[in-house]
């Protein structure tokens, strides 16, 4: 799992990995994330958009959106603590 971190933003690079691994890596990353952190996931799994929409709904995170460019997908969401 590759990731970079800036203040309140984490970039998780899971290119080349397929369902369910991107969401599992994001879930592991969320264990050390803070309320308000924005997570950007860079992936190539064509099912990732739907997977992350469900994941965010389940965890009550704020799903921000998805950008598809060629074979790369960038998904962004925000950690929201209850």
Image (cartoon, grey):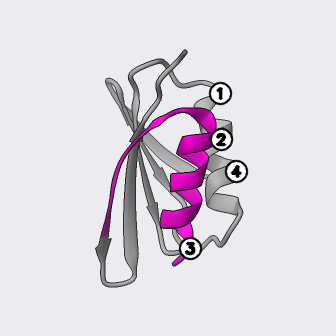
Which residue is under mark 4? 24
Q: Secondary structure at mark 4?
A: helix
- Answer whether labels 2 and 1 touch (C-beta < 8 Å): yes
Residue range highlighted in magenta: 46-67
Q: Residues within 10 Å of mark 4 (few under 14, many from 20)?
A: few
Residue 70, placed above or below residue 18? below
- Answer whether labels 3 and 4 touch (C-beta < 8 Å): no
**Residue drawn at (49%, 45%) of the image:** 3
Q: Secondary structure at mark 2?
A: helix
Residue 12, position in %: x, y?
48, 49
Cα distance in 3D space between marks 4 and 1 = 11 Å
**Residue drawn at (47%, 29%) of the image:** 79
Which residue is under mark 2? 27
Cα distance in 3D space between marks 1 and 3 = 23 Å
Q: Which badge, 3 or 2, comes first in the chain's sequence?
A: 2
Q: Secondary structure at mark 3?
A: loop
Cα distance in 3D space between marks 2 and 1 = 7 Å
Cα distance in 3D space between marks 3 and 4 = 14 Å
Which numbered mark, 1 or 3, is in the foreground of this view? 3
Which numbered mark, 3 or 4, is in the foreground of this view? 3
**Residue drawn at (56%, 73%) of the image:** 47
Residue 33, position in %: x, y?
53, 25
Q: Secondary structure at mark 1?
A: loop
Which residue is under mark 1? 31
Which numbered mark, 3 or 2, is in the foreground of this view? 3
Cα distance in 3D space between marks 3 and 2 = 17 Å
Which residue is under mark 3? 47
- Answer whether labels 4 and 1 touch (C-beta < 8 Å): no
Q: Residues within 10 Å of mark 3 (few under 14, many from 20)?
A: few
Residue 7, position in %: x, y?
32, 24
- Answer whether labels 2 and 4 touch (C-beta < 8 Å): yes
Magenta stretch: includes residue 49: yes
């Amino acid at each position: 799992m590759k990731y970079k971190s800036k203040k309140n933003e984490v970039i998780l690079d899971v290119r080349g990995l397929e369902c369910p691994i991107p969401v599992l890596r994001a879930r592991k990353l969320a264990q050390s994330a803070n309320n308000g952190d924005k997570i950007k996931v860079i992936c190539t799994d064509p099912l990732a958009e739907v997977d992350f929409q469900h994941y965010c709904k389940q965890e009550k995170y704020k799903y921000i959106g998805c950008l598809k460019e060629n074979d790369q997908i960038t998904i962004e969401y925000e950690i929201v603590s209850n």
